[in-house]
Amino acid sequence: GKGTYDHFMLKEIHEQPTSLSQAIEGRIDPAGGRIALADFEPGTFADVDSVQFVACGTSYHAALYGSLALNQAGVQSTALLANEYSVSAPPIDDDTLVIAVTQSGETADTLTALRRAASEGAATLTLTNVVGSTAAREADDALFIRAGPEIGVAATKTFSSQAVMLTLLAQRIAADLRGEPPADLEALLPELESMPAAIDDVLAGSAAKTVARRYSDSEAYFFIGRGLGYPVALEGALKFKEITYEHAEGFASGELKHGPLALVTPETPVFAIFTGQEDEKTLKNAEEAQTRGAPVIAVCPDDHPAVEVADDHLPIPDTEPDLAGLLANVQLQLVSYHAADLLGRPIDKPRNLAKSVTVE
Ligand code: M6R
């Protein structure tokens, strides 16, 4: 049941320290300076020359996160919407690895893309929460996120675990390809290990409810981020629209000035996500919105320059750029939850949506 929580979504948001501990348990080895994915022999990915991700919705945002992490580790990769894959898949060969990211393992669009990739000769891997699911059974390999059951239609803890597992996998693939661990792995491992504690900090001190209340009369809600903050901006907006029924959009920070800025008014708060990747540019983009009257809510560490500029601040602990966006995402999950709660929405079962979408 929901225990002391009013909704499964809030319970599942609060389960993230535990679900993430389960995800990484035995899979990182800070002392040995490596990723220990026992599921895969060392060198498994040595021949992979490109990675394609296929996924939908929130899982697509996790896939985009993983794909950017791979690119940053020097591995060629793209994330594709599974429902677009049959008409626009990039070329595949024997050394293409196609990774399906699907919490349920039963999403029809994702299964279709996975089957197409396999029929064209790609190696396939499914990242999922459900052991025995169709996608887990059909792919060559499966990697499980061990998040435990997620009842709320809005994906929360599964997103965090998917993104963290893809961060691990990206490091592993890069290490196999090069024959040695990526240079930044040493700094990343202890930060990965302390993610559950960092999420606890976010949950304990969150100002999300106050922020949600302050902006509850707005016309639309915008989310901007750059680099690994971009998929988080998309996910922040999806969660917000899905459970509040309010208009929300996520943008790459630098895109704001290429069109969306025309929508910006004092009635459109802008949530700006800072991950430590060209933050000065993101801050400038946020200020461009602020100049047009939009309140800016900075999601960043306490000592960040954005705090001085922003109208509000949702703090996150200091960490590596590979992980900062995932802490920001927890703040945004809470903002969406409280905004929806203030509006009296049926948070665990938003209208028109299903937990698992088994039609194309
Ligand atoms: O089970 P899957 O991860 O394949 O589901 C894909 C999407 O339907 C899903 O992520 C959806 O976008 C979320 N429930 C939204 O919160």
Image (spheres, helix red, strand yellow):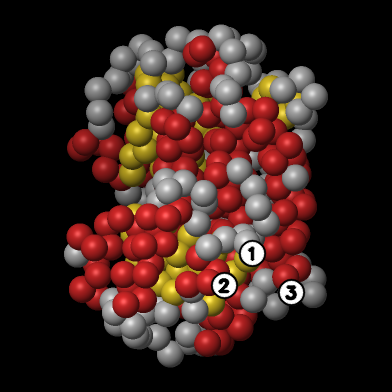
Give the numbered dot on residue 5.
Answer: 3
Q: Residue at x 45, y 69 (%)?
A: 271
Residue on which the image places disc 2: 313
For the N terminus, the image quarter is bottom right
Residue 180 showing in the rendered view: yes
Image quadrant assignment for residue 10: bottom right
| Amino acid type, callout 1 | Asp
Q: Earlier in the sequence, mark 2 or mark 3?
A: 3
Residue 44 showing in the rendered view: no
Q: Secondary structure at mark 2?
A: strand
168 or 359, nearer to the observer = 168
| Amino acid type, callout 2 | His
Q: Residue at x 40, y 86 (%)?
A: 218
Give the left or right position of residue 96, taking residue 338 as reference.
left
Image coordinates of residue 53 in percent, x first then y, are 40, 34
The answer to whether mark 2 and mark 1 are in CB contact below 8 A is: yes
Q: Is residue 209 above or below residue 30?
A: below
Q: Earlier in the sequence, mark 2 or mark 1?
A: 1
Q: How many marks?
A: 3
Give the numbered dot on residue 62.
Answer: none
The answer to whether mark 1 and mark 3 are in CB contact below 8 A is: no
- Residue at the extreme bottom: 217
Q: Secondary structure at mark 3?
A: loop
Nearer the observer: mark 1 or 3; the answer is: 1
Image coordinates of residue 102 in percent, x first then y, are 50, 43
Residue on which the image places disc 1: 302
196 or 128, nearer to the observer = 196
Image coordinates of residue 320 in percent, x first then y, are 61, 43
Q: How many residues crowd around disc 3 within 10 Å: few (fewer than 14), some, or many (20 or more)?
A: few
